[in-house]
Image (cartoon, coloured by chain):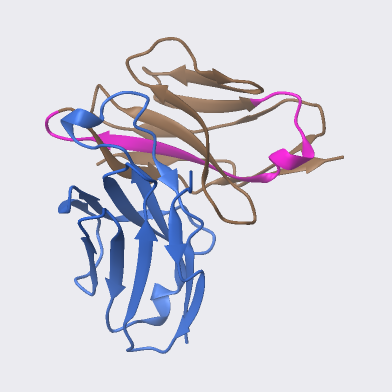
Amino acid sequence: DAGVTQSPTHLIKTRGQQVTLRCSPISGHKSVSWYQQVLGQGPQFIFQYYEKEERGRGNFPDRFSARQFPNYSSELNVNALLLGDSALYLCASSPKSGPEGQGAGNTIYFGEGSWLTVV
Amino acid sequence: AQTVTQSQPEMSVQEAETVTLSCTYDTSESDYYLFWYKQPPSRQMILVIRQEAYKQQNATENRFSVNFQKAAKSFSLKISDSQLGDAAMYFCAYRTTTAYGGATNKLIFGTGTLLAVQP
């Protein structure tokens, strides 16, 4: 089975532009979350979606938005790009969330990430 | 708010030797999950081992084991018989729970420990 897939793998944008990153979860996984990893730091939580609803949001400005589609894939959008948005954006999926998500089987799996460089 | 601290920015170990990576966390929750993730140069996050807070027994996965001290809020990773392929950045992560007790996909990461394995 395919793992979590993300696209594009690398991209370069100019300050002020907008970017859309895409993620396809593992087949059967209904929960998708997004993380930002700046060089030299641990990943920071941005969003979680479960069954197409936002279930959590990290401390990021409104320039960051996301959505989940009926097939459970997801897009992360960032508007008005700043130099500080340059980072690796990681998508993660898991089978369930919330009260149904207890148990060791509800493992979170990560994709290989999308490298965003803002110049 | 929960926090995760990794106080060792870099560690080095000889091939075939044992190394322990430290992690402490702070939380007011009684039920949670703890993880160690490995991030090689490819940047994909790979789950190494997980621990449910309600389990007193320390988790073990082949050469990897943890020392979970709930009262001390400590969660260290021991790698036995270190191999060259173990060289990577290692992140300790805490998984939050919802108001209803279920697991979310929000992971709180430490700043990481870069492990070098010397031949």
Label count reads: 0
In the picture, measured across the screen, residue B62 lies left or right of residue B3, that is right
Is B87 on the left or on the right of A14, as rendered? right
Please identify the quarter of the rendering in which residue B66 is found. Answer: top right
Q: Which chain is blue?
A: A
- A108 in magenta: no
What x and y, as percent, mark residue A94? Answer: 34, 41
Q: Looking at the image, is A35 positioned above or below residue B1? A: below
- Where is residue A4 drawn, in percent x and y? 44, 51
Task: Give coordinates of residue A87: x percent, y percent.
Answer: 46, 68
Which is nearer the eye, A13 or A58? A13
Q: Residue at x 24, y 59 (%)?
A: A59
Determine which quarter of the picture holds residue A79: bottom left
Name the residue nearer the viewer: B28 or B59: B59
The answer to whether residue B102 of the structure is visible from this angle is no
When the figure is inspected, residue B75 is found, relative to residue B119, above or below; the finding is: above
Q: Colour of chain B?
A: brown
Question: Can the viewer see residue B85 in this picture?
Answer: yes
**Residue at horizontal 40 percent and vertical 30 percent from the top:** B34
Q: Is residue A68 left or right of residue A86?
A: left
Instruction: Decide which of A57, B61 is in the foreground and name it.
Output: B61
Q: Which residues are magenta?
A: B79-100
User: Which residue is located at x 22 percent, y 60 percent?
Assistant: A69
Give x and y (percent) for residue A106: 34, 31
Name the residue located 51 percent from the left edge and 47 percent from the top edge. B45
Residue B82 among those drawn in magenta: yes
Closest to the observer, B48 or B90? B48
